[in-house]
Amino acid sequence: MDVLIFSGQSNMQGQSEALTDTVPVEEAFEYRLFEDDLIPLKNPVGEDVTKEGTKGEAGSDGTDLSLWLSRHALGAAWCGCDNPVPAFCRAYIRECGRPVAAVHAAKGSTVIADWLPGSDCYGMLVRKSRAALKKTAQISDVGAVFFIWLQGESDAIEGCSSAEYKKNILILADSLKKDLDIDKFAIIRVGRFTEDERDLAVMNAQSEVCSENPLFIMLTEKAAEMCGEPKFMNPRVGGHFSAEGFAALGNEAGGVLGRFVHDSRSKKEAIGS
């Protein structure tokens, strides 16, 4: 069973406008930290985890966002709506035929520095992922371990330079390789949020690390295009994908990673080499 770790900010946490797809994904499971169990994967995905590692509060339209962010290290899909993980896993399994244990470890409104070693988010990400790997190993041989990243909107807002973002993402990837032995750091390139050159700085940094470093793989750069199509965007929250957008983005990105795995195994190549 392959382990897919999904991390990033609000578009990976899930901030769509509706709960539209609640069909369990065949041969896919989601690891839940508090139950220490693998349950059938379906929307809504994720769990709210405080910085102390206790059960947190579910986010809703009436939630004090600043207070919620100050208390939590990880968050479930906001308002219990769709996020991209089920569509991603469905496409991944379709392309490579490998069962999946999904680990959702994301939090909205975070810059990449919030995920570096020593942070609350990184500590809880590693804790949850290690527990998931242990639980998966109890029921199956653990295959590939992929880290899937959808993040960067907040860095664009803050005007983070390409050089600074690249430096931080390399630190994060190196730490994940050491702490979780990931096979690939897989990027869903961030979409447009500021609609100016600040978006391009983050996009370019993400594209460059994938072309320069073999630990990275680019899954899709289509998020920027999707941001220009209203049907793919949450009509209530600017810069965030709709349920339809998450389905399309997850299907695209999961299919790419699944084909990579299929081709790698067909050629008898080590996935992480």
Image (cartoon, rainbow, N blue to C red):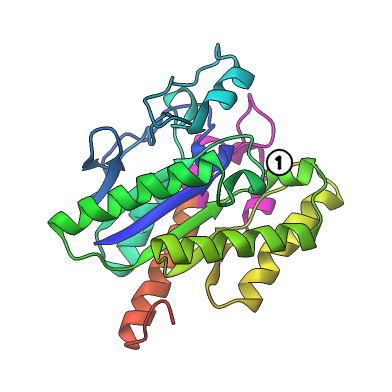
Magenta stretch encompasses residue 156:
no
**Residue 256 in view here:** no
For the point 64% across and 34% down, which residue is it?
109
Quadrant location of residue 82? top left
Front residue (pair 221, 161): 161
Instruction: Give, as a three-letter code, the residue at label 1.
Output: Ser
Q: Is residue 184 above or below residue 27?
A: below
The residue shown at (40%, 66%) is: 181
The picture places residue 95, in percent across and down from the top left corner, at 34, 67
Name the image quarter holding the C terminus: bottom left
Q: Position of residue 66 (x, y in %)?
A: 64, 20
Q: Residue furthest right?
A: 197
Residue closest to the eye, 122 or 241? 122
Query: Residue 140 location, x and y as percent?
Result: 16, 61
Badge 1 marks a residue whose secondary structure is helix
Number of numbered callouts drawn: 1
- Which residue position is annotated with label 1? 154
User: Is residue 176 shown to the viewer in this render?
Assistant: yes
Q: Residue furthest front?
A: 118
- What residue appears at the point 55 percent right and 52 percent down from the top-left corner? 117
Instruction: Farthest residue to the left: give it.
Output: 139
Q: Is residue 260 left or right of residue 24?
A: right
Residue range highlighted in magenta = 222-249
Q: Residues within 10 Å of mark 1 (few under 14, many from 20)?
A: many
Residue ranking furthest to the top: 62
- What residue is at 42 percent from the left and 74 percent from the top? 260
